[in-house]
Amino acid sequence: MLKILTENWALKVLSLVFALILWFFVMGERKLERSYAVPLEITNVPKGMMVANEVPSEVEVRINGPRTLLMNLRAEDMRITVDLKDLPAGLTSYKRLEERLDIPAPLKVTRLTPSYVDILVDRIRSKQVPVKPVLAGRPAAGFEVRKVAAVPESLVVEGAESELDSLQRVETAPFSIEGATGNLAGRVPLRYGRKFSWIKDPGDVEIKVMIGRRSGN
């Protein structure tokens, strides 16, 4: 038995090495399919404009190809770039995103999610709008609100033109007057929840509420 194991040992070792090389070659060339979360990058937004809609930050890409190439492919080494240079204001649909992905030739993209992106480019403008104080609660019985004022009375909002067109005012967080029997003053934050515009100088505003006895009491 020992003689059988030791006889022609060099040939046996060589055969084993050859078999291993062949196995790795076959496994390496076997076709696989993997998913990658590839960053979506927007570049060269025209001056004085902005992207005014929700655009995904990543695209799920399924790639098919030789195992050896796929195992060395990393999502962080890939990019899908959308160049907005000289693009006019409006909505543009970008299809065939796989053509914007640089991968080795043997690899093929089999699916993208989403398969396209819509990008709305809008002009940036500013608009001055009034501040609307929001009150919470009621004065004490027999008292009423005579006057409400905000300092400052108005502020500047900047952002996408299409979003500012419908903006009429900016409201404050609720200011409590519950049970009040006299004038009140205090500072409250602003409430602004729009996605594609912003208050130029954000900060708390002062609310002044004049409260007096109801007529006839």
Image (cartoon, helix red, strand yellow):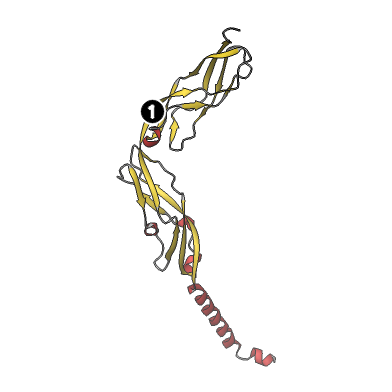
Residue 167: which quarter of the image? Answer: top left
Q: What element carries label 1?
A: strand
User: Does 176 sit above or below residue 124?
Assistant: above
Q: Where is residue 65 in the image (x, y as percent from the top left)?
A: 45, 69
Q: Residue at x 37, y 59 (%)?
A: 99
- Residue lying farthest to the top in this orientation: 216
Q: Position of residue 203 (x, y in %)?
A: 50, 26
Tag 1: amino acid: Lys
- In terms of depth relative to the viewer, which is nearer, 88 or 108? 88
Q: Callout 1: 10 Å neighbours few (<14), some, many (20+)?
A: some
Q: Where is residue 51 in the image (x, y as percent from the top left)?
A: 39, 42
Report whether 174 appears left or right of 163: right
Q: Residue at x 42, y 49 (%)?
A: 41
* Residue ID for mark 1: 127
Q: Residue at x 40, y 41 (%)?
A: 52
The quarter of the image holding the N terminus is bottom right
- In terms of depth relative to the viewer, which is nearer, 61 or 164? 164
Q: Residue at x 48, y 55 (%)?
A: 76
User: Does 39 sit above or below residue 182?
Assistant: below
Residue 48: which quarter of the image? Answer: top left
Residue 98: which quarter of the image? Answer: bottom left
User: Does 144 sit above or below residue 40?
Assistant: above
The quarter of the image holding the C terminus is top right
- Residue lying farthest to the right in this orientation: 1
